[in-house]
Amino acid sequence: SADGLTLTYTLRADSLSPADAQASIEAAVWPELADIRRMRQSGSHTLTVELLQTNCGLVDTLARLPILHQSDALSDAPSASGVFWVEGMSTPSPTLPLKGGGGFLRFFDDEASALAALQAGEVDRVYLRQEPPPLPKGYQLEAYPAPIVTLITFNNQEAPFDNVAVRQALSRAVDREKILQLAFDGAGELAAGFLPAAHYAADPALAAPEYDPGASARLLDKAGLQDADDDGWRELPDTGETWQVAIRANRDNPAETKTALLAADALRQIGVQARAEIVTFPTILDNLTRHDYQMIVYSLPLPPDLDWRVYWHSAQIDAEFGLNLPAYANPQVDAWLEEANRVSHCNRAERIKLYQKIQAQLAQDRPVDFLLRPYYFVALRE
């Protein structure tokens, strides 16, 4: 509509109805869906969605939402989505036969099993997170930047990580190139911020902090984290106790584990008594969601839309579905995030201006230390 508050969807598939589309939307649990005023079904192919206010993130979510039959919308074994239909799905089976295009999807417990199937010529395409050994004849390998960014997050609610200068200092102590080469075997690209450099909204002026242990040490000295007793370790200014830092990582992710070990070693070089704690992934999730940690290495997915409120808005620190895992709070960033999501007709140029301001502020505040974007791989039958 002219005011951008009414969205009309026309279904082209006769097998799906407006009631199916409405059920699929209602089954989704994204917080931004609260801005839907009402939905109206018209005829056999039209669904109208009326919004309470402009919500660019919601528009993008609705555009990407899979439409399922009403009976499947809340099912853990849906029969259809898109152009393929699932037939014969069963929990014990590692395959998922598909109607509509032929073939099937096959699931593997680990990459070793997937590679074994590839070597045996049993699959036409395999997606891998690590570069495989030489492929059998008839296959080719492609590498691409993963839609994630690997980072080290700081607990912005816990002293001294609540001090911007301390976060800046620790960011300059970490050698990103060394991590890329030793932890990721060189398969990736360094990250200056949340968005990849090729993204249409990326700030071209953004640059990662330079690796400079000397500057890092001076910043920590200025912040009061000094080695007053000359024992080689910095002390907390309030208590005089040795500053001990734990950097946690998922034990099932070798690259992130190595990253934590390398980061801990880098901090020890500037007098921070740091250690890597390698724990289970459920522990990582629990620590992040409860903000019960000091530093954690993990990878954050890049959302398809530029609505970053769930990641960086202070209201999302303790929200049920919030992903503000570093507990970052900056009123100016909150205001920019809200403004960017309410831009009239979701004008791309206006949103880019606001998101570049947000990127620059994140680079300054360093709620997390963006490290790199690893490469993923796909092996294809020629």
Image (tube, helix red, strand yellow):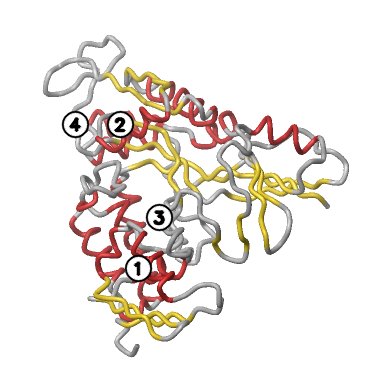
Residue behind mark 2: 287
Q: Is residue 341 left or right of residue 65?
A: left
x, y percentage for residue 58?
35, 68
Residue behind mark 3: 74
Residue behind mark 1: 58
x, y percentage for residue 183?
56, 30
Given contact means CB atoms under 8 Å apart, are the residues at marks 2 and 4 in contact? no
Front residue (pair 382, 90): 90
Give the foreground label among 2 and 4.
2
Q: In which quadrant of the rendered image does the N terminus lie?
A: bottom left
Instruction: Work out how far the residue at label 2 is from the one at label 1, CA to CA, in angstroms.
Output: 29 Å
Instruction: Work out how far the residue at label 2 is from the one at label 3, CA to CA, in angstroms.
Output: 29 Å
Instruction: Work out how far the residue at label 2 is from the one at label 4, CA to CA, in angstroms.
Output: 17 Å
Q: Quadrant of residue 48?
A: bottom left
Residue 210 at least partly seen: yes
Q: Residues within 10 Å of mark 2 (few under 14, many from 20)?
A: some
Q: Secondary structure at mark 2?
A: helix
Q: Is residue 213 left or right of residue 144?
A: left
What amino acid does circle 4 point to?
Ala
